[in-house]
Amino acid sequence: MSNAFLEALKQRRTQYALGRNLSASKAELTALIQDAIKHSPSSFNSQSSRAVILFGAESDKVWQIAIDEVRKVAPAEGFDKTEAKLKSFAAGVGTVLFYEDQDVVRSLQEQFALYADNFPVWSEQSGGMAQLSTWAALANAGVGASLQHYNPLIDAAVAAEWNIPASWKLRAQMPFGSNEASFGDKAFMDDAERFRVVG
């Protein structure tokens, strides 16, 4: 059976070789990212996911922050490879910073005490779905991306740079741009080890 959504999902791959050779405009990319997050599910329709979409020099800043912060904790020996990797993320068109609003989580915990312990978990699940939706939507538009996690190391500096609300918790960073390298074959574990079909 044919399924357009699955075909789009299969295009989602990690792209480290990013460039700035995109025909899509900043406005088009912004609308795509916003729609992907807006239409991602969340528990109790809480809409706890937040995003900061950075383009150009603003995107470059987040990766310079990452270089500066990682340098403080990483061994000096071999740091040039780490720095090159971080600079490769800045080579793209932009970066999406994914957040979860903890005020929303706390409000739900107060309103629905029976499920209080679950709301932080459900928030993380919502954030993951927003990230996947964005990544798949970008891939379907021919835009390369990867998902990075330099939080919490960069949180304070990023919050100060872009005046991020205190209740927003940084969960991931997604650099995106043109695909400057092809993708190899993706390996999958055997279905029998991963799935059980009953009935």
Image (spheres, rainbow, N blue to C red):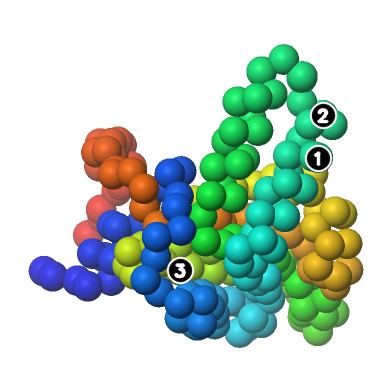
- How many numbered discs sit on the rendered protein? 3
In the rendered structure, are the residues bearing label 1 and label 3 in contact, judged by CB atoms less than 8 Å apart?
Answer: no
Residue 35 located left or right of residue 150? left
Residue at (64, 47) in percent of width and height:
149
**Quarter assignment of residue 193:** top left
* Mark closer to the observer (2, 3): 2
Cα separation between marks 2 and 3: 33 Å
Q: Is residue 7 visible?
A: yes
Nearest to N terminus: mark 2 or mark 3: 2
Question: SS class of the residue under badge 1?
Answer: helix
Residue for badge 3: 133
Question: Which quarter of the figure is the N terminus placed in?
Answer: bottom left
The residue where tag 2 is placed is 73
Residue at (28%, 66%) from the top-left corner?
Answer: 8
The amino acid on which the numbered mark 3 sits, given as a three-letter code, is Ser
Q: Residue at x 80, y 58 (%)?
A: 158
**Residue at image x 65%, y 33%?**
83
Q: Dot 2 lies on which element? A: helix
Which amino acid type corresponds to the residue marked 2 in the rendered image? Val
Residue 93 picture location, percent across and down: 52, 61
Provide residue 126's location: percent of width, then percent of height: 59, 69
Separation of marks 2 and 1 at Cα, in angstroms = 7 Å
Which residue is disc 1 drawn over? 69
Where is residue 56? Give x, y as percent: 61, 63
